[in-house]
Protein backbone atom coordinates (compact mmCIF):
# COMPACT_ATOMS: atom_id res chain seq x y z
CA UNK A 1 0.00 0.00 0.00
CA UNK A 2 1.42 3.32 -1.02
CA UNK A 3 1.35 6.28 1.28
CA UNK A 4 0.90 9.64 -0.35
CA UNK A 5 2.03 12.68 1.58
CA UNK A 6 -0.40 15.46 2.30
CA UNK A 7 0.57 19.05 1.60
CA UNK A 8 1.12 19.61 5.32
CA UNK A 9 3.49 16.63 5.54
CA UNK A 10 5.36 17.80 2.44
CA UNK A 11 5.72 21.30 3.92
CA UNK A 12 6.94 19.87 7.22
CA UNK A 13 9.55 17.69 5.48
CA UNK A 14 10.71 20.58 3.31
CA UNK A 15 10.96 22.86 6.34
CA UNK A 16 13.06 20.29 8.23
CA UNK A 17 15.36 19.85 5.24
CA UNK A 18 15.82 23.62 4.96
CA UNK A 19 16.72 23.79 8.67
CA UNK A 20 19.30 21.01 8.25
CA UNK A 21 20.85 22.75 5.22
CA UNK A 22 20.89 26.05 7.11
CA UNK A 23 22.66 24.37 10.06
CA UNK A 24 25.30 23.00 7.69
CA UNK A 25 26.04 26.44 6.26
CA UNK A 26 26.19 27.87 9.79
CA UNK A 27 28.68 25.14 10.72
CA UNK A 28 30.73 25.86 7.58
CA UNK A 29 30.75 29.60 8.35
CA UNK A 30 31.89 28.98 11.92
CA UNK A 31 34.65 26.66 10.69
CA UNK A 32 35.95 29.23 8.22
CA UNK A 33 35.72 32.10 10.74
CA UNK A 34 37.55 30.21 13.49
CA UNK A 35 40.34 29.16 11.15
CA UNK A 36 40.76 32.70 9.82
CA UNK A 37 41.08 34.04 13.38
CA UNK A 38 43.59 31.32 14.33
CA UNK A 39 45.57 31.95 11.16
CA UNK A 40 45.70 35.71 11.83
CA UNK A 41 46.81 35.09 15.43
CA UNK A 42 49.47 32.65 14.29
CA UNK A 43 50.85 34.88 11.53
CA UNK A 44 50.76 38.13 13.49
CA UNK A 45 52.42 36.66 16.55
CA UNK A 46 49.79 38.40 18.70
CA UNK A 47 49.98 35.67 21.29
CA UNK A 48 53.40 35.04 22.79
CA UNK A 49 53.51 31.26 22.99
CA UNK A 50 55.92 28.76 21.57
CA UNK A 51 55.59 28.76 17.75
CA UNK A 52 55.14 24.99 17.51
CA UNK A 53 52.10 25.19 19.78
CA UNK A 54 50.27 27.51 17.37
CA UNK A 55 51.21 25.50 14.31
CA UNK A 56 49.97 22.30 15.93
CA UNK A 57 46.80 23.96 17.23
CA UNK A 58 45.98 25.43 13.84
CA UNK A 59 46.68 22.16 12.01
CA UNK A 60 44.62 20.04 14.41
CA UNK A 61 41.75 22.54 14.49
CA UNK A 62 41.69 22.85 10.70
CA UNK A 63 41.98 19.10 10.14
CA UNK A 64 39.44 17.92 12.66
CA UNK A 65 37.11 20.76 11.80
CA UNK A 66 37.29 19.83 8.13
CA UNK A 67 36.35 16.25 8.99
CA UNK A 68 33.42 17.53 11.04
CA UNK A 69 32.18 19.81 8.26
CA UNK A 70 32.61 17.06 5.66
CA UNK A 71 30.69 14.58 7.82
CA UNK A 72 27.96 17.12 8.43
CA UNK A 73 27.75 17.82 4.70
CA UNK A 74 27.47 14.14 3.84
CA UNK A 75 24.82 13.75 6.52
CA UNK A 76 22.79 16.60 5.06
CA UNK A 77 23.28 16.12 1.34
CA UNK A 78 23.85 12.36 1.49
CA UNK A 79 25.97 10.18 -0.68
CA UNK A 80 24.56 11.89 -3.78
CA UNK A 81 27.54 14.22 -3.58
CA UNK A 82 29.74 11.25 -4.39
CA UNK A 83 27.45 8.86 -6.21
CA UNK A 84 24.60 9.83 -8.49
CA UNK A 85 21.36 7.85 -8.70
CA UNK A 86 22.37 5.90 -11.79
CA UNK A 87 25.98 5.31 -10.71
CA UNK A 88 25.52 1.53 -10.32
CA UNK A 89 23.98 1.18 -13.77
CA UNK A 90 26.76 3.19 -15.42
CA UNK A 91 29.46 1.25 -13.55
CA UNK A 92 27.91 -2.09 -14.51
CA UNK A 93 27.71 -1.02 -18.16
CA UNK A 94 31.32 0.18 -18.05
CA UNK A 95 32.55 -3.11 -16.59
CA UNK A 96 30.55 -5.17 -19.10
CA UNK A 97 31.85 -3.08 -22.00
CA UNK A 98 35.39 -3.50 -20.71
CA UNK A 99 34.88 -7.26 -20.41
CA UNK A 100 33.44 -7.51 -23.94
CA UNK A 101 36.32 -5.56 -25.47
CA UNK A 102 39.00 -7.94 -24.16
Image (cartoon, grey):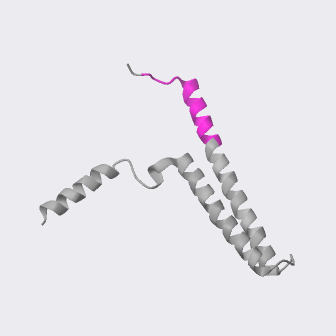
When the figure is inspected, residue 23 is found, relative to residue 91, above or below; the finding is above
- Residue 41, by quadrant, is bottom right
Q: Nearer the viewer, residue 47 or 3?
A: 47
Q: Name the spot of residue 86 as percent of width and height, x first.
A: 33, 49
Which quadrant is the C terminus positioned in?
Answer: bottom left
Q: Name the spot of residue 78 as percent of width and height, x first.
A: 50, 47
The residue sitting at 67% across, 67% down in the picture is 60
Q: How many marks?
A: 0
The residue sitting at 72% across, 76% down in the picture is 55
The residue sitting at 73% across, 70% down in the picture is 57
Q: Which residues are magenta?
A: 3-19
Is 51 in the magenta?
Answer: no
Judge from the rendering whether residue 102 lies leftward or rightward of residue 53; answer left or right: left
When the figure is inspected, residue 42 is found, relative to residue 15, above or below; the finding is below
Residue farthest to the top, as pictured: 1
The secondary structure making up most of the magenta span is: helix
Judge from the rendering whether residue 53 lies leftward or rightward of residue 15; answer left or right: right
- Residue 47, by quadrant, is bottom right
Which quadrant is the N terminus positioned in?
Answer: top left
When the figure is inspected, residue 64 is found, relative to residue 43, above or below; the finding is above
Judge from the rendering whether residue 37 lies leftward or rightward of residue 22; answer left or right: right
Is 5 in the magenta?
Answer: yes
Q: Nearer the viewer, residue 21 or 31?
A: 31
The residue sitting at 28% across, 54% down in the picture is 90
Q: Name the spot of residue 65 as percent of width and height, x first.
A: 65, 60
Q: Nearer the viewer, residue 23 or 52?
A: 52
Q: Name the spot of residue 8 as percent of width and height, x first.
A: 58, 24
Amino acid sequence: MEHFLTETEKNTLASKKIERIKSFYTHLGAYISINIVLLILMISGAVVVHQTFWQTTFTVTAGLGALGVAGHGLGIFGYRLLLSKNWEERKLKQLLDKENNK
